[in-house]
Image (cartoon, grey):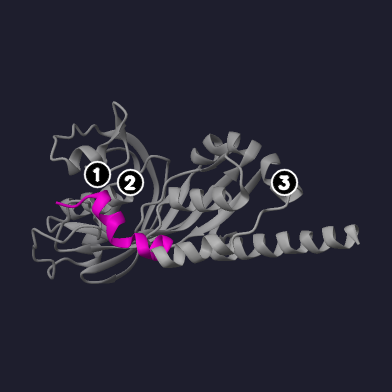
Amino acid sequence: MASKGSYYAKHKAKIHGTPEEQAQKRLQQVAIHEPLRKTFEEGKVLLIDKPLHWTSFDVVRKIRNSIKIKKVGHAGTLDPLATGLLIVCTGKFTKKINEYMAQVKEYTGAFTLGATTATYDKESDPENQQPFEHITELQIKQAAQQFVGAIEQFPPVYAAIKKDGVAQYELARRGKDVDLQARPITIYEFEITAVALPVVQFRVACSTGTYIRSLAHDIGQALQCGAYLSELRRTKIGDFDTANAVTLDAFLEQLKADNEAMNVVTNNEEN
């Protein structure tokens, strides 16, 4: 059975580097200048293009350690296998997180027909293979429209929703029964953009709390062939767009450049 813990163990070297690489990075770290650090304490909204395999908290932790302040948070989780827009707020702007989380989100991605997975995505192995060759593009588009509007959605068993302080996926990993409750969400748009069976490309605009993994699973049930999410990218949150986001590496490089520039100014003033 799949587990978030085993996924992290499998990919942690891709996220943090090998132990040797981590040690080298620690040696290369330099202290951030106080005036620069204070700009983050006063509050910034960072638009980060989350890399594949990183959790949203991995990104927050990396930024927090780099800018040396405690108050850093994100406005909406992206699964490790998703990429795209992650809003990271620092300092006083962490008060804006709930406001950003409530805004409409847009995703593009793909689901694969003909099988299901325990996690509803590629984090676990496909199973329950079913024929899909007979399904037409029209049938797929008609199935998608069934989910447009205000609906009740069951989250995946492997989800970060907490019960009595324990994440739902942790209970599932331990083999305990998970009591799934449907939750009200709204799908504003669900567009099928390309079909090359068994892969179906889509774009969806939805309310907060929507699990795109569940949407992929549910459309597979509607088509009676099974489906799982095979690709996901968040492109918008309200008026924020990935077109204005930067990669995590680019952010860190800019932070380093700003810190070095401040170091030059400080040295000139001392001389």
Q: Which residue is mark 3?
A: 39
Q: Nearer the viewer, mark 3 or mark 1?
A: 3
- For the residue pair 176 and 194, the one nearer the viewer reads as 176
Query: For the point 36% across and 64% down, which residue is it?
Result: 13
Residue 45 in the image, given as x and y percentages of width and height: 62, 47
Q: Is residue 78 at least partly visible in the picture? A: yes
Q: Tag 2: residue type?
A: Tyr
Q: Which residues are magenta?
A: 1-18
Query: For the point 16% across and 66% down, which residue is it?
Result: 135
Residue 211: image tag: 2
Q: Quadrant of residue 127?
A: bottom left
Label 2 crowding class (10 Å Cα cut-off): few <14, some 14-19, many 20+? Answer: some
Residue 156: image tag: 1
Residue 212 in the image, given as x and y percentages of width and height: 33, 50
Q: Are circles 1 and 2 on residues that touch, CB within 8 Å?
A: yes
Q: Please determine whether, in this image, residue 147 is positioned above or below residue 11.
A: above
Which element carries disc 2, helix, strand or loop? loop
Left/right placement of residue 236 relative to residue 227 reads right
Q: Which is more N-terminal, label 2 or label 3?
A: 3
State how far apart marks 3 and 2 are (Cα). 35 Å
Label 3 crowding class (10 Å Cα cut-off): few <14, some 14-19, many 20+? Answer: few
Left/right placement of residue 188 relative to residue 255 reads left
Q: Main secondary structure of the magenta part?
A: helix
Q: Is residue 248 magenta?
A: no
